[in-house]
Image (cartoon, grey):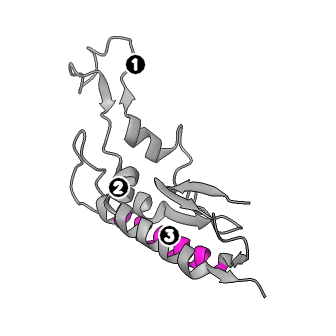
Amino acid sequence: MPYSAALFGIDISTAGYSGHHFDRRFMRVAMIKIGRDVQKGARQLVSGHGPSRAGAYPAMATGALRRSITYRVSQPGFMVVVSPRDPKDGSFKTDGFYPSLLHYGVRRSGRSKTHRKHADATPWRISPRGNYMTDSMAQRKARAEAAIMDAVRRGITEKR
């Protein structure tokens, strides 16, 4: 029975492969390589020094965000998730998840702050930053597609 799936916009069809077996080890190895590559790119994007600006990628002050970007491969090995995760030291245990606050921004409260020292006209307390995760994946899409196609090609073997 033919089966088809779409991975990263690539159509993979198994029509004509009824007498073949798929070895998942090759796909798992490919997903590990893709995960490491995207993780490395995302960490490079948030490694800038100095104050970060609105719309730019977050800059590095302590390195907690950069260290928190990790990857996990699913048990079957057909999926990889690259995301910032809460570090073991609990440095993100604040009122919100730190990477989310940087990505979506934080608005000022509605009450008047004329008595405050740093009151200004902007409605943002922290303006939204650039999405380093999707940009890292977009930059590596061609390599990821090639690695998946190579893993599929190498994983298909004849039944014995």
Q: Which residue is mark 2?
A: 138
The residue carrying pointer 3 sits among few (fewer than 14), some (14 to 19) or many (20 or more) residues within 10 Å by Cα, namely many
Determine the residue positioned at 31% across, 65% down.
44
**Residue 66 screen position, x and y as percent:** 40, 62
Q: Quadrant of the C terminus?
A: bottom right
Lateral position of residue 32 relative to residue 130, left or right:
right
- Residue 153 magenta: no
Q: Which mark, by number, is residue 109?
A: 1
* Real-space Cα separation, disc 3 to disc 2, in angstroms: 15 Å
**What are the residue bounds of the magenta stretch?**
25-43
Lateral position of residue 39 relative to residue 138, left or right:
right
Above or below, 111 against 78 in this view is above
| Amino acid at the residue labelled 3 | Ile
Determine the residue positioned at 46% across, 53% down.
9
Q: Earlier in the sequence, mark 3 or mark 2?
A: 2
Determine the residue positioned at 61% across, 56% down.
4
| Amino acid at the residue labelled 1 | Ser
The residue carrying pointer 2 sits among few (fewer than 14), some (14 to 19) or many (20 or more) residues within 10 Å by Cα, namely few
Lateral position of residue 2 relative to residue 139, left or right:
right
The quarter of the displayed image where residue 156 is located: bottom right
Q: Secondary structure at mark 2?
A: helix
Q: Quadrant of the N terminus?
A: bottom right
- Residue 29 magenta: yes
Q: Which mark, by number, is residue 148?
A: 3
Closer to the camera, 3 or 26?
Answer: 3
Determine the residue positioned at 23% across, 60% down.
49
Q: Earlier in the sequence, mark 1 or mark 3?
A: 1
Q: Secondary structure at mark 3?
A: helix
**Residue 103 screen position, x and y as percent:** 39, 41
Q: Secondary structure at mark 1?
A: loop
| Amino acid at the residue labelled 2 | Ala
Report if residue 92 is visible in the image: yes
